[in-house]
Image: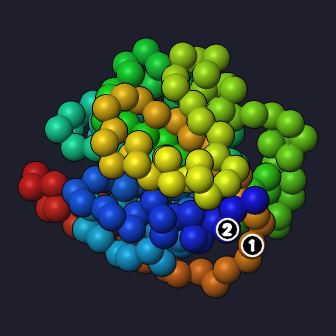
Amino acid sequence: MLDRRQVVQNLLAHRTDQLIISGLGAPTYDVANAGDHPLNFYFWGAMGGSVPCGLGLALTQPSRNVIVITGDGEMLMGLGSLATIAQHRPANLAVVVLDNERYGETGQQDSVTASGVALDEIATACGIKALRITNQTELDDLVLRLSVLNETLFSVVKVANNDYSRILPLRDGVEIKVRFKQALGS
């Protein structure tokens, strides 16, 4: 399995003006660790909300690429959003699920992905192009795809269950929203 923090570093290493939405918990810590940016929108206390938020942004900001980086637990909470994404198919939306097969924020219990639930297959069944990333070569391909995003893309990146220190970005929801809106120019 890949190293979660290194995966996020790779995903954001050549970032330009993409809008990054990070799911609560480890994905937010990892996005912040890769470098705070005014176009990062960090989710706090809204499990299952990052993917629908990313969809809304992709639909209202069609000239900007939107990348949602979230975990398997949060994606499981928001599975219904995959059907809505498939209905709209925004070519500027990518969802990257960091799948460590654990509910990290509540005590490291196994998530259902540990027993075989395949989030990429659920996305495919909804009609979304989906990838499963298990090695560095596949990750490098994903990074390239994200740099020239021109179709709705869903990726599950299988990552080790590493425990890293928490890198805490902004936590005030109003401040995050205001900063993000200003960075968008709205």
Residue 23, horizontal then vertical, whole percent: 53, 55
Q: Say which of 174 and 55 sits in front.
A: 55
The quarter of the picture where residue 37 lies is: bottom left
Q: Pointers 1 and 2 in contact (CB under 8 A)?
A: yes
| Label 2: which secondary element | loop
Front position among marks 1 and 2 = 2
Earlier-in-chain disc, 1 versus 2: 2
Q: Nearer the viewer, residue 166 or 9?
A: 9
In what quadrant of the picture does the N terminus appear?
Answer: bottom right
Among the 4 quarters of the image, the one containing residue 118: top right
Pointer 1: what residue?
162
Q: Is residue 56 visible?
A: no
Query: Which residue is depicted at the point 59% across and 48% down?
Result: 138
> Which label was assigned to residue 5?
none
Residue at label 2? Answer: 3
User: Hey, what amino acid is under mark 2?
Assistant: Asp
| Residue at screen point 33% across, 64% down | 14
Tag 1 secondary structure? loop
> Which of the two residues, 49 or 146, is positioned nearer the viewer here?
146
Say left or right for 95 vs 110.
Answer: left
Rate crowding at label 1 as few (under 14), some (14 to 19) or many (20 or more) other CA atoms within 10 Å.
few
Q: Amino acid at mark 1?
A: Asn
The CA span between labels 1 and 2 is 7 Å
Residue 71 spot, x, y in % from top left: 63, 53
Q: Nearer the viewer, residue 94 or 176?
A: 94
Q: Residue at x 31, y 62 (%)?
A: 15
